[in-house]
Amino acid sequence: MAQGARRTTGQVVGVLLLAVGVAAFLSVAAVRHGFFDLQVYYGALTWWVHDGGEIYDYLRPFTQYGFTYPPFAALVMLPMAYLPWVAAIVVSVTATVVVTAVLLWWLLDPIVRRAGWTPWFTLAVALCLAAAFEPMRETVNFGQVNMLLLFLVAVDLLRLLPAGNRWAGIGIGLATAIKLTPGIFIVYLLVTRRWRAALTAMATTAGASLLAAALFPDASREFWTEALWNTGRVGELAFVSNQSLRGVVARLNPEHPSTLAWLVLVLGTLALWAWRSRLAAAAGDEATGLALTGALMCLVSPVTWVHHLVWLLPALILLVENAVRAPAGGRRRRLLLVAAIVGYGLLCSRIVWAWEKDFTGVDGFLGSNTYVWISLAVVAFLPVRRWAARDGSAAEASGVPQLDQADGRAPAGQRHRIGRPLTVR
Protein backbone atom coordinates (compact mmCIF):
# COMPACT_ATOMS: atom_id res chain seq x y z
CA MET A 1 0.00 0.00 0.00
CA ALA A 2 2.76 2.40 1.02
CA GLN A 3 4.79 1.46 -2.04
CA GLY A 4 1.80 2.19 -4.31
CA ALA A 5 1.25 5.54 -2.63
CA ARG A 6 4.92 6.44 -3.07
CA ARG A 7 4.73 5.47 -6.73
CA THR A 8 1.63 7.62 -7.27
CA THR A 9 3.25 10.54 -5.46
CA GLY A 10 6.36 10.18 -7.60
CA GLN A 11 4.25 10.14 -10.76
CA VAL A 12 2.33 13.26 -9.71
CA VAL A 13 5.59 15.06 -8.95
CA GLY A 14 7.06 13.87 -12.24
CA VAL A 15 4.09 15.17 -14.24
CA LEU A 16 4.20 18.52 -12.43
CA LEU A 17 7.93 18.90 -13.08
CA LEU A 18 7.45 17.98 -16.74
CA ALA A 19 4.59 20.47 -17.05
CA VAL A 20 6.75 23.21 -15.53
CA GLY A 21 9.60 22.31 -17.89
CA VAL A 22 7.29 22.36 -20.93
CA ALA A 23 5.83 25.70 -19.82
CA ALA A 24 9.33 27.12 -19.52
CA PHE A 25 10.21 25.76 -22.97
CA LEU A 26 7.07 27.25 -24.48
CA SER A 27 7.78 30.62 -22.91
CA VAL A 28 11.03 30.69 -24.87
CA ALA A 29 10.29 28.67 -28.03
CA ALA A 30 6.61 29.22 -28.79
CA VAL A 31 5.73 32.04 -31.17
CA ARG A 32 2.69 34.09 -30.16
CA HIS A 33 0.50 34.31 -33.24
CA GLY A 34 -2.39 35.94 -31.41
CA PHE A 35 -4.87 33.38 -32.78
CA PHE A 36 -4.31 34.86 -36.24
CA ASP A 37 -6.26 32.24 -38.19
CA LEU A 38 -9.06 32.27 -35.65
CA GLN A 39 -9.25 36.03 -36.16
CA VAL A 40 -9.66 35.42 -39.89
CA TYR A 41 -12.52 32.97 -39.27
CA TYR A 42 -14.12 35.24 -36.68
CA GLY A 43 -13.77 38.36 -38.82
CA ALA A 44 -15.11 36.65 -41.95
CA LEU A 45 -18.12 35.23 -40.13
CA THR A 46 -18.87 38.55 -38.44
CA TRP A 47 -18.57 40.36 -41.78
CA TRP A 48 -20.89 37.79 -43.34
CA VAL A 49 -23.54 37.51 -40.61
CA HIS A 50 -23.65 40.99 -39.10
CA ASP A 51 -22.32 43.32 -41.81
CA GLY A 52 -24.01 41.84 -44.86
CA GLY A 53 -20.81 41.09 -46.77
CA GLU A 54 -19.88 37.97 -48.72
CA ILE A 55 -17.71 35.66 -46.64
CA TYR A 56 -15.15 35.05 -49.40
CA ASP A 57 -14.76 38.77 -50.06
CA TYR A 58 -13.43 39.35 -46.55
CA LEU A 59 -9.71 39.89 -46.02
CA ARG A 60 -8.17 40.39 -42.60
CA PRO A 61 -7.21 44.09 -42.40
CA PHE A 62 -3.75 44.85 -43.82
CA THR A 63 -3.25 41.24 -45.01
CA GLN A 64 -4.04 39.06 -48.03
CA TYR A 65 -5.64 36.37 -45.89
CA GLY A 66 -9.32 35.49 -46.05
CA PHE A 67 -11.66 32.59 -45.40
CA THR A 68 -10.46 29.70 -47.61
CA TYR A 69 -12.56 26.75 -46.39
CA PRO A 70 -15.66 25.34 -48.13
CA PRO A 71 -19.11 26.72 -47.27
CA PHE A 72 -19.87 23.74 -45.02
CA ALA A 73 -17.00 24.85 -42.78
CA ALA A 74 -18.69 28.26 -42.55
CA LEU A 75 -21.90 26.51 -41.51
CA VAL A 76 -20.07 24.54 -38.80
CA MET A 77 -18.31 27.68 -37.55
CA LEU A 78 -21.41 29.88 -37.79
CA PRO A 79 -22.08 29.95 -33.99
CA MET A 80 -18.72 31.71 -33.61
CA ALA A 81 -20.29 34.86 -35.10
CA TYR A 82 -22.54 35.11 -32.05
CA LEU A 83 -19.80 34.67 -29.45
CA PRO A 84 -17.57 37.30 -27.87
CA TRP A 85 -13.97 37.10 -29.11
CA VAL A 86 -12.63 35.73 -25.82
CA ALA A 87 -15.31 33.02 -25.79
CA ALA A 88 -14.31 32.00 -29.33
CA ILE A 89 -10.71 31.58 -28.12
CA VAL A 90 -11.82 29.47 -25.16
CA VAL A 91 -13.94 27.21 -27.38
CA SER A 92 -11.10 26.79 -29.89
CA VAL A 93 -8.46 25.90 -27.30
CA THR A 94 -10.77 23.67 -25.27
CA ALA A 95 -11.94 21.71 -28.32
CA THR A 96 -8.34 21.18 -29.46
CA VAL A 97 -7.22 19.96 -26.02
CA VAL A 98 -10.18 17.60 -25.60
CA VAL A 99 -9.91 15.90 -29.01
CA THR A 100 -6.12 15.68 -28.61
CA ALA A 101 -6.51 13.89 -25.28
CA VAL A 102 -9.01 11.41 -26.74
CA LEU A 103 -6.88 10.72 -29.82
CA LEU A 104 -3.73 10.26 -27.74
CA TRP A 105 -5.52 7.78 -25.52
CA TRP A 106 -6.76 5.75 -28.48
CA LEU A 107 -3.19 5.49 -29.76
CA LEU A 108 -1.55 4.96 -26.36
CA ASP A 109 -3.98 2.40 -24.96
CA PRO A 110 -2.34 -0.61 -26.69
CA ILE A 111 1.08 0.49 -25.35
CA VAL A 112 -0.26 0.99 -21.84
CA ARG A 113 -1.86 -2.45 -21.83
CA ARG A 114 1.20 -4.22 -23.17
CA ALA A 115 3.82 -2.39 -21.08
CA GLY A 116 1.73 -2.16 -17.92
CA TRP A 117 2.13 1.61 -17.65
CA THR A 118 -0.16 3.66 -15.42
CA PRO A 119 -2.90 5.00 -17.74
CA TRP A 120 -3.41 8.48 -16.25
CA PHE A 121 0.34 9.03 -15.93
CA THR A 122 0.99 7.97 -19.53
CA LEU A 123 -1.71 10.27 -20.87
CA ALA A 124 -0.55 13.20 -18.75
CA VAL A 125 3.04 12.81 -19.95
CA ALA A 126 1.83 12.51 -23.56
CA LEU A 127 -0.24 15.69 -23.26
CA CYS A 128 2.76 17.59 -21.91
CA LEU A 129 4.93 16.33 -24.75
CA ALA A 130 2.21 17.18 -27.28
CA ALA A 131 2.10 20.74 -25.93
CA ALA A 132 5.79 21.14 -26.80
CA PHE A 133 5.30 19.67 -30.31
CA GLU A 134 5.72 22.58 -32.74
CA PRO A 135 2.79 21.71 -35.05
CA MET A 136 0.54 21.39 -31.97
CA ARG A 137 1.59 24.65 -30.36
CA GLU A 138 1.25 26.38 -33.74
CA THR A 139 -2.24 24.92 -34.13
CA VAL A 140 -3.25 26.31 -30.74
CA ASN A 141 -1.55 29.69 -31.19
CA PHE A 142 -3.07 30.20 -34.64
CA GLY A 143 -6.51 28.92 -33.56
CA GLN A 144 -6.44 26.29 -36.31
CA VAL A 145 -8.78 23.33 -36.86
CA ASN A 146 -6.13 20.68 -37.59
CA MET A 147 -6.68 18.48 -34.54
CA LEU A 148 -10.46 18.53 -35.02
CA LEU A 149 -10.03 17.21 -38.57
CA LEU A 150 -7.51 14.58 -37.45
CA PHE A 151 -9.97 13.48 -34.77
CA LEU A 152 -12.82 13.10 -37.26
CA VAL A 153 -10.65 10.92 -39.51
CA ALA A 154 -9.40 8.90 -36.52
CA VAL A 155 -12.98 8.16 -35.43
CA ASP A 156 -13.40 6.31 -38.72
CA LEU A 157 -10.04 4.57 -38.99
CA LEU A 158 -9.44 3.72 -35.34
CA ARG A 159 -12.97 3.06 -34.06
CA LEU A 160 -15.64 2.52 -36.72
CA LEU A 161 -13.74 0.75 -39.51
CA PRO A 162 -12.04 -1.91 -37.31
CA ALA A 163 -15.42 -2.70 -35.72
CA GLY A 164 -17.06 -3.13 -39.12
CA ASN A 165 -19.49 -0.32 -38.31
CA ARG A 166 -21.73 0.58 -41.23
CA TRP A 167 -21.21 4.29 -40.52
CA ALA A 168 -17.46 4.05 -41.18
CA GLY A 169 -16.51 6.85 -43.56
CA ILE A 170 -18.76 9.52 -42.10
CA GLY A 171 -15.93 11.18 -40.16
CA ILE A 172 -13.70 11.35 -43.24
CA GLY A 173 -16.62 12.74 -45.24
CA LEU A 174 -17.29 15.49 -42.71
CA ALA A 175 -13.59 16.38 -42.47
CA THR A 176 -13.40 16.63 -46.28
CA ALA A 177 -16.48 18.86 -46.40
CA ILE A 178 -14.87 21.17 -43.83
CA LYS A 179 -11.46 21.26 -45.51
CA LEU A 180 -10.74 19.53 -48.81
CA THR A 181 -7.33 18.03 -48.01
CA PRO A 182 -8.64 15.15 -45.79
CA GLY A 183 -10.23 13.87 -48.99
CA ILE A 184 -6.96 11.93 -49.45
CA PHE A 185 -8.40 9.49 -46.91
CA ILE A 186 -11.22 8.70 -49.34
CA VAL A 187 -8.47 7.72 -51.77
CA TYR A 188 -6.99 5.58 -48.97
CA LEU A 189 -10.31 3.77 -48.58
CA LEU A 190 -10.49 3.18 -52.33
CA VAL A 191 -6.87 2.00 -52.63
CA THR A 192 -7.41 -0.43 -49.76
CA ARG A 193 -10.75 -1.61 -51.24
CA ARG A 194 -13.05 -0.53 -48.43
CA TRP A 195 -15.78 0.29 -50.92
CA ARG A 196 -18.65 0.80 -48.51
CA ALA A 197 -16.70 3.15 -46.25
CA ALA A 198 -15.45 5.06 -49.30
CA LEU A 199 -19.00 5.46 -50.63
CA THR A 200 -20.19 6.60 -47.19
CA ALA A 201 -17.39 9.17 -47.05
CA MET A 202 -18.15 10.48 -50.54
CA ALA A 203 -21.89 10.62 -49.85
CA THR A 204 -21.27 12.46 -46.58
CA THR A 205 -19.03 15.02 -48.28
CA ALA A 206 -21.55 15.53 -51.08
CA GLY A 207 -24.48 15.74 -48.69
CA ALA A 208 -22.77 18.26 -46.42
CA SER A 209 -21.68 20.37 -49.40
CA LEU A 210 -25.18 20.31 -50.91
CA LEU A 211 -26.68 21.31 -47.58
CA ALA A 212 -24.34 24.30 -47.44
CA ALA A 213 -25.16 25.15 -51.06
CA ALA A 214 -28.89 25.08 -50.30
CA LEU A 215 -28.45 27.36 -47.28
CA PHE A 216 -25.79 29.65 -48.75
CA PRO A 217 -26.07 29.54 -52.56
CA ASP A 218 -24.13 32.74 -53.21
CA ALA A 219 -21.23 31.77 -50.94
CA SER A 220 -21.12 28.27 -52.45
CA ARG A 221 -21.09 29.63 -55.97
CA GLU A 222 -18.24 32.01 -55.13
CA PHE A 223 -16.17 29.32 -53.39
CA TRP A 224 -16.40 26.64 -56.07
CA THR A 225 -15.95 29.00 -59.01
CA GLU A 226 -13.52 31.63 -57.66
CA ALA A 227 -12.17 31.41 -54.10
CA LEU A 228 -11.02 27.79 -54.39
CA TRP A 229 -8.78 28.65 -57.34
CA ASN A 230 -7.30 31.84 -55.90
CA THR A 231 -3.97 30.50 -54.63
CA GLY A 232 -2.79 33.98 -53.67
CA ARG A 233 -5.02 33.83 -50.61
CA VAL A 234 -2.91 31.16 -48.89
CA GLY A 235 0.57 32.71 -49.04
CA GLU A 236 3.91 32.19 -50.80
CA LEU A 237 4.77 28.64 -51.85
CA ALA A 238 8.50 29.12 -51.19
CA PHE A 239 7.95 30.34 -47.61
CA VAL A 240 9.87 28.04 -45.27
CA SER A 241 6.71 27.17 -43.34
CA ASN A 242 5.43 25.35 -46.44
CA GLN A 243 6.74 21.87 -45.64
CA SER A 244 5.31 20.06 -48.65
CA LEU A 245 6.91 18.69 -51.80
CA ARG A 246 5.61 21.79 -53.58
CA GLY A 247 7.47 23.89 -51.04
CA VAL A 248 10.70 21.95 -51.69
CA VAL A 249 10.45 22.59 -55.43
CA ALA A 250 9.50 26.25 -54.92
CA ARG A 251 12.51 26.88 -52.69
CA LEU A 252 14.79 25.49 -55.40
CA ASN A 253 13.58 28.22 -57.77
CA PRO A 254 11.18 30.66 -56.10
CA GLU A 255 10.64 32.71 -59.25
CA HIS A 256 9.84 29.79 -61.56
CA PRO A 257 9.12 26.59 -59.58
CA SER A 258 8.91 23.51 -61.81
CA THR A 259 5.41 22.07 -61.91
CA LEU A 260 6.74 19.02 -63.77
CA ALA A 261 9.29 18.25 -61.04
CA TRP A 262 6.58 18.59 -58.42
CA LEU A 263 4.22 16.23 -60.27
CA VAL A 264 6.97 13.62 -60.67
CA LEU A 265 7.71 13.76 -56.94
CA VAL A 266 4.01 13.54 -56.11
CA LEU A 267 3.43 10.53 -58.38
CA GLY A 268 6.43 8.69 -56.94
CA THR A 269 5.31 9.37 -53.39
CA LEU A 270 1.75 8.28 -54.19
CA ALA A 271 3.01 4.97 -55.63
CA LEU A 272 5.08 4.24 -52.53
CA TRP A 273 2.21 5.22 -50.24
CA ALA A 274 -0.32 3.07 -52.13
CA TRP A 275 1.90 0.00 -51.82
CA ARG A 276 2.55 0.49 -48.11
CA SER A 277 -1.06 1.42 -47.32
CA ARG A 278 -2.30 -1.79 -48.90
CA LEU A 279 0.18 -3.71 -46.75
CA ALA A 280 -1.18 -1.95 -43.67
CA ALA A 281 -4.78 -2.68 -44.64
CA ALA A 282 -3.99 -6.34 -45.36
CA ALA A 283 -2.48 -6.57 -41.86
CA GLY A 284 -5.51 -4.90 -40.31
CA ASP A 285 -3.25 -2.07 -39.17
CA GLU A 286 -5.56 0.93 -39.46
CA ALA A 287 -3.46 3.10 -37.15
CA THR A 288 -0.49 2.80 -39.50
CA GLY A 289 -2.81 3.47 -42.43
CA LEU A 290 -3.85 6.68 -40.66
CA ALA A 291 -0.23 7.67 -40.08
CA LEU A 292 0.91 6.89 -43.63
CA THR A 293 -1.97 8.77 -45.23
CA GLY A 294 -1.61 11.75 -42.89
CA ALA A 295 2.05 12.04 -43.86
CA LEU A 296 1.14 11.68 -47.54
CA MET A 297 -1.41 14.46 -47.25
CA CYS A 298 1.25 16.78 -45.86
CA LEU A 299 3.59 15.89 -48.72
CA VAL A 300 1.28 16.16 -51.73
CA SER A 301 -0.78 19.16 -50.66
CA PRO A 302 0.52 22.27 -52.47
CA VAL A 303 0.63 24.11 -49.15
CA THR A 304 1.45 22.41 -45.84
CA TRP A 305 2.16 24.94 -43.15
CA VAL A 306 4.04 23.73 -40.07
CA HIS A 307 0.83 23.59 -38.02
CA HIS A 308 -0.62 21.08 -40.50
CA LEU A 309 2.05 18.59 -39.43
CA VAL A 310 -0.01 17.48 -36.43
CA TRP A 311 -0.88 14.65 -38.84
CA LEU A 312 2.60 13.23 -38.04
CA LEU A 313 1.71 12.75 -34.37
CA PRO A 314 0.24 9.22 -34.84
CA ALA A 315 3.45 8.10 -36.58
CA LEU A 316 5.61 9.12 -33.62
CA ILE A 317 3.38 7.24 -31.18
CA LEU A 318 3.38 4.16 -33.42
CA LEU A 319 7.18 4.20 -33.45
CA VAL A 320 7.08 4.01 -29.65
CA GLU A 321 4.54 1.17 -29.77
CA ASN A 322 6.68 -0.80 -32.21
CA ALA A 323 9.68 -0.23 -29.96
CA VAL A 324 7.77 -1.51 -26.91
CA ARG A 325 6.80 -4.64 -28.84
CA ALA A 326 10.38 -5.28 -30.02
CA PRO A 327 12.66 -7.54 -27.93
CA ALA A 328 14.07 -5.74 -24.89
CA GLY A 329 17.68 -4.70 -25.38
CA GLY A 330 17.56 -5.53 -29.07
CA ARG A 331 18.85 -3.43 -31.95
CA ARG A 332 15.37 -2.98 -33.37
CA ARG A 333 14.02 -1.47 -30.17
CA ARG A 334 16.93 0.97 -30.01
CA LEU A 335 16.51 2.04 -33.63
CA LEU A 336 12.78 2.63 -33.25
CA LEU A 337 13.21 4.62 -30.04
CA VAL A 338 15.97 6.71 -31.61
CA ALA A 339 13.75 7.38 -34.65
CA ALA A 340 10.86 8.47 -32.39
CA ILE A 341 13.07 10.68 -30.21
CA VAL A 342 14.92 12.30 -33.11
CA GLY A 343 11.72 12.88 -35.09
CA TYR A 344 9.94 14.35 -32.09
CA GLY A 345 12.95 16.48 -31.15
CA LEU A 346 13.27 17.95 -34.64
CA LEU A 347 9.53 18.64 -34.77
CA CYS A 348 9.81 20.61 -31.52
CA SER A 349 12.91 22.54 -32.49
CA ARG A 350 11.77 25.13 -35.08
CA ILE A 351 14.87 24.05 -37.00
CA VAL A 352 13.49 24.97 -40.43
CA TRP A 353 13.19 28.61 -39.38
CA ALA A 354 16.99 28.90 -39.27
CA TRP A 355 16.75 29.14 -43.08
CA GLU A 356 13.73 31.46 -43.20
CA LYS A 357 15.68 34.29 -44.87
CA ASP A 358 18.10 32.25 -46.96
CA PHE A 359 17.39 28.66 -48.02
CA THR A 360 20.03 28.50 -50.76
CA GLY A 361 22.94 26.07 -50.86
CA VAL A 362 23.15 22.45 -49.74
CA ASP A 363 22.59 23.33 -46.08
CA GLY A 364 19.56 25.41 -47.05
CA PHE A 365 18.12 22.59 -49.16
CA LEU A 366 18.57 20.02 -46.41
CA GLY A 367 17.73 22.20 -43.42
CA SER A 368 14.81 24.24 -44.73
CA ASN A 369 13.02 21.02 -45.74
CA THR A 370 13.69 19.04 -42.56
CA TYR A 371 10.03 18.35 -41.85
CA VAL A 372 9.49 17.18 -45.43
CA TRP A 373 12.25 14.60 -44.98
CA ILE A 374 10.52 13.39 -41.80
CA SER A 375 7.21 13.01 -43.64
CA LEU A 376 8.94 11.08 -46.43
CA ALA A 377 10.63 8.82 -43.87
CA VAL A 378 7.22 8.06 -42.34
CA VAL A 379 5.77 7.04 -45.70
CA ALA A 380 8.83 4.93 -46.58
CA PHE A 381 9.83 3.34 -43.29
CA LEU A 382 7.08 3.41 -40.65
CA PRO A 383 6.68 -0.29 -39.73
CA VAL A 384 3.50 -2.03 -40.79
CA ARG A 385 2.38 -4.31 -37.97
CA ARG A 386 0.92 -7.74 -38.65
CA TRP A 387 -1.27 -9.80 -36.34
CA ALA A 388 -1.74 -13.42 -37.42
CA ALA A 389 -4.41 -15.12 -35.31
CA ARG A 390 -5.38 -18.73 -36.05
CA ASP A 391 -8.79 -18.29 -34.46
CA GLY A 392 -10.49 -15.96 -32.00
CA SER A 393 -12.71 -12.94 -32.15
CA ALA A 394 -14.55 -12.00 -35.32
CA ALA A 395 -12.34 -8.96 -35.74
CA GLU A 396 -9.19 -11.07 -35.64
CA ALA A 397 -10.64 -13.67 -37.95
CA SER A 398 -11.16 -10.93 -40.51
CA GLY A 399 -7.60 -9.70 -40.06
CA VAL A 400 -8.65 -6.48 -38.30
CA PRO A 401 -7.34 -6.15 -34.72
CA GLN A 402 -9.28 -4.05 -32.24
CA LEU A 403 -7.48 -1.08 -30.75
CA ASP A 404 -8.49 -2.12 -27.27
CA GLN A 405 -6.51 -5.34 -27.69
CA ALA A 406 -2.84 -4.71 -27.10
CA ASP A 407 -1.37 -7.37 -29.35
CA GLY A 408 -4.20 -9.17 -31.04
CA ARG A 409 -5.30 -11.01 -27.88
CA ALA A 410 -8.97 -11.37 -27.07
CA PRO A 411 -10.40 -9.44 -24.13
CA ALA A 412 -10.53 -11.12 -20.75
CA GLY A 413 -13.13 -13.84 -20.60
CA GLN A 414 -12.66 -15.00 -24.19
CA ARG A 415 -10.39 -17.96 -24.95
CA HIS A 416 -8.52 -18.63 -28.14
CA ARG A 417 -5.14 -19.70 -29.35
CA ILE A 418 -2.71 -16.95 -30.20
CA GLY A 419 -1.07 -17.26 -33.58
CA ARG A 420 2.41 -16.20 -34.57
CA PRO A 421 3.90 -13.28 -32.63
CA LEU A 422 3.88 -9.78 -33.99
CA THR A 423 6.01 -9.18 -37.04
CA VAL A 424 6.49 -6.04 -39.08
CA ARG A 425 7.30 -5.31 -42.64
Image (cartoon, rainbow, N blue to C red):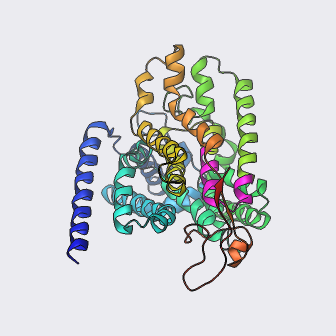
Q: Is residue 358 above or below residue 284?
A: above
Residue 258: x and y, percent?
Answer: 69, 21
Q: Total label count?
A: 0
In magenta segment, residue 218: no
Residue 368: x and y, percent?
Answer: 49, 25
In the figure, is residue 93 to the left or right of 407? left
Q: Outermost residue, bottom direction?
A: 413
- Residue 220 visible, this angle: no
Residue located 40% across and 45% down the image: 133
Q: Is residue 393 above or below residue 267?
A: below
In the figure, is residue 142 to the left or right of 319? left
In magenta segment, residue 286: yes
- Residue 21 visible, this angle: yes
In the figure, is residue 5 to the left or right of 137? left
Q: Outermost residue, front direction?
A: 329
Residue located 68% across and 73% down the image: 167
Residue 66: x and y, percent?
Answer: 50, 42
Nearest the camera: 102 or 171? 102
Could you tell me what secondary structure mostly forms the magenta stretch? helix
Provide the residue span drawn in magenta: 279-295
In the figure, is residue 49 to the left or right of 93? right
Residue 347: x and y, percent?
Answer: 44, 39
**Screen quadrant of the N terminus:** bottom left
